[in-house]
Image (cartoon, helix red, strand yellow):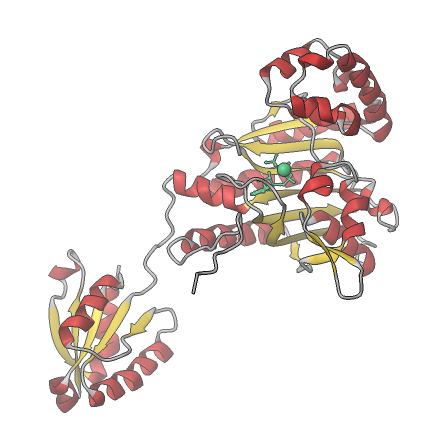
Amino acid sequence: MSEIAAIRGMSDILPDETPRWQFLERTVASVLAAYGYGEIRLPVVEKTALFKRSIGEVTDIVEKEMYTFDDRNGDSMALRPEGTAGCVRAAIQQGILNTPRRLWYTGPMFRYERPQKGRQRQFHQTGVESFGVATPDMDAELIVLCARLWRRLGLTDCVELQINSIGNAEARKAYRDALVDYLQGHLDALDEDSQRRLHSNPLRILDSKSPQTQAILDGGPTLTDFLDEEANTDFARLCELLDAAGVAYVVNRRLVRGLDYYNKTVFEWVTDRLGAQGTVCAGGRYDGLVKQLGGKPTPAVGFAMGMERLVLLLAEQGVVADAATVDVYVVAVGSDAELMALVSTERVREENPRLRIMQHAGGGSFKSQMKKADKSGARVALIWGEDEVAAHAVTIKSLREGDGERLEQSTVPLGELDSTLCAALAP
Ligand code: ATP
Ligand code: MG
C-alpha cells in the first residue's frame, strides 16, 4: 500500500526540535506573566463571516488564503488564519471588556500560501491583545514587552523594530485616493501584484518588494502628510516612551499591515537572518474592531509573533535548549531483574520527580541494552542483572566522558541508590 503523506505546508515537529519550541513557549509565557497578561484559549474553527468582517473582504487572507468549508448544516466555517478576530469575538461574547483586559493566546493558524522557509500553511502564532486603553503608553508597553522577550531569548542583536503611524480611517481614505491618482499615471511601470492591488488594496503597494515600484512611490504622496493631529501626537509620545525605555526603533513611513482593522500605531520586528520571510512579529492598534464586530466601542492594540520564524532564528543563532531528554537509563537483564528494576525505578521517580529516567523495555542482551543506554543521551545507566538481584544492589555506570573521574562504575546497596545517583548527576 502506498504511504499517506502530510498535507503540503503542514509540518510535523519532531522530538529533536521540540526542546527549542518548549524553550520559546516557556519564555514567552513567563514574560507575559511578568506583565500581568492572562491566557485565553480559543477555538480553531470560527464562522467564515467573522474573518470577512474583521480582516477585510479584499485582503489577501480572505480573498485567497483562507481554508473554508461548509459544515454538515451548510454553514460556512473557516480554520482561523489569525487570532485577533477570534479573541475579539470571545471577549465581546463573554462580556470581559468592561475593564481594561490584557490577553494572550497561542496555537496553530492556517493560510493557503506557497510553502517556503518560514512560510507554511499550518503555522503557529502567539498573539497578545490589550483592550480598553486608547493612549500610546499601552502601545509602548507591548513593544517593551517584546524587547524583553528578545533579550530573554538571546535574539536582541538580530531583530530590528520598525514603527509607523497609519492614522485614522479618514486619513487613510484621503491618502488612498491621492495614492491611486498618482499611481494611475505610472500603471505600466508597477509590478504585477501592485497593479492588481491598485484598486483592491492600494496601501499594500507600499509593501511591494519591487525596487522599481518603490522608486515610483518615492515620487508620490506620503501617508504621513495626511495624518491628523491626534495620530501625530500619539506617535510622538510613543517615540518618547520608547526612547526613555531604551528601545531602539526605525521609523518606516511605508510600513502598513495587510489586515484592514489597524489604525494609528503599527509595528514590526524584522530580521535579516531568515531571507525573504523576515518579519517575526507584527501588530498595531485596532480601535475600531470591537465595535465593528458588534461590541461596545473599545480601543485595542496587539501583535502576533510567528513561532516558526522565531524557532528558525533560535536555531540560526545557535540557541539550544537542553537537547537530551533523559538523565538516567535503566538496564535490566532477566525477568527478576526487570521486576526489581520496575519497582525501584518507580520509587526513584517518586523521590526525585525532576529526574528523567527511561527504563529499557523489550528485553535483550546486556550488550544491546547498553547500546540503547548510550544512544539515549543519558549521563548514567542503572544496571540490574542476576548478581544485583541476588545481592539487593544496583550497579551505577557513568555513560559520559568527564563524569568518568567521579564515577566509573560501582555497585551499591539499594538503600544508597538515591544518594549515589544524586552525587553522580550533580552538575
Ligand atoms: P507576511 O508578510 O510574512 O505574509 P503577514 O503580514 O501576513 O506576514 P501577520 O498576519 O501580521 O503576517 O502575522 C503575524 C506574524 O505571523 C508574521 O509576522 C509572521 O511572523 C507570522 N506568519 C504569518 N503568516 C505566516 C505563515 N504562512 N507561515 C509562518 N509564519 C507566518
Ligand atoms: Mg501574509
The structure residue drawn at horizontal position 24% and vertical position 72%, both measured from the top left corner, is 421
Q: Is residue 42 above or below residue 410?
A: above
Residue that appears at 25% across and 83% down: 341
Q: Residue furthest front?
A: 1
Q: How many marks?
A: 0
Horizontally, is 78 left or right of 143 in the view?
Answer: right
Place residue 197 in its image quadrant.
top right
Front residue of this view, candidates 63 and 21: 63
Q: Position of residue 270 (x, y in %)?
A: 55, 31
Residue 290 can be seen in this image: yes
Horizontal and vertical percent position of residue 28: 54, 50
Image coordinates of residue 410 in percent, x first then y, are 12, 74
Q: Quadrant of residue 420?
A: bottom left
- Is 389 above or below relative to 119? below
Image quadrant where one finds the N terminus = bottom left
Quadrant (top left/top right/bottom left/bottom right) for the C terminus? bottom left
Of residues 359 and 25, the one nearer the viewer is: 359
Q: Quadrant of ligand 1?
A: top right
Is residue 15 placed above or below 218 in the rendered structure?
below
Q: Is residue 163 left or right of residue 390?
A: right
Is 235 left, or right, of 229 in this rendering?
left
Pick the residue in front: 272 or 71.
Answer: 71
Q: Quadrant of residue 354?
A: bottom left
- Residue at coordinates 21% horizontally, 74% vertically from top-left? 382
Task: Give whichever of 153, 308 is nearer the camera.
Answer: 308
Residue ID at (81%, 54%):
97
**Residue 100 drawn at (x, y percent):** 77, 50
Q: Tell me, yes or no, if residue 236 can be seen here.
A: no
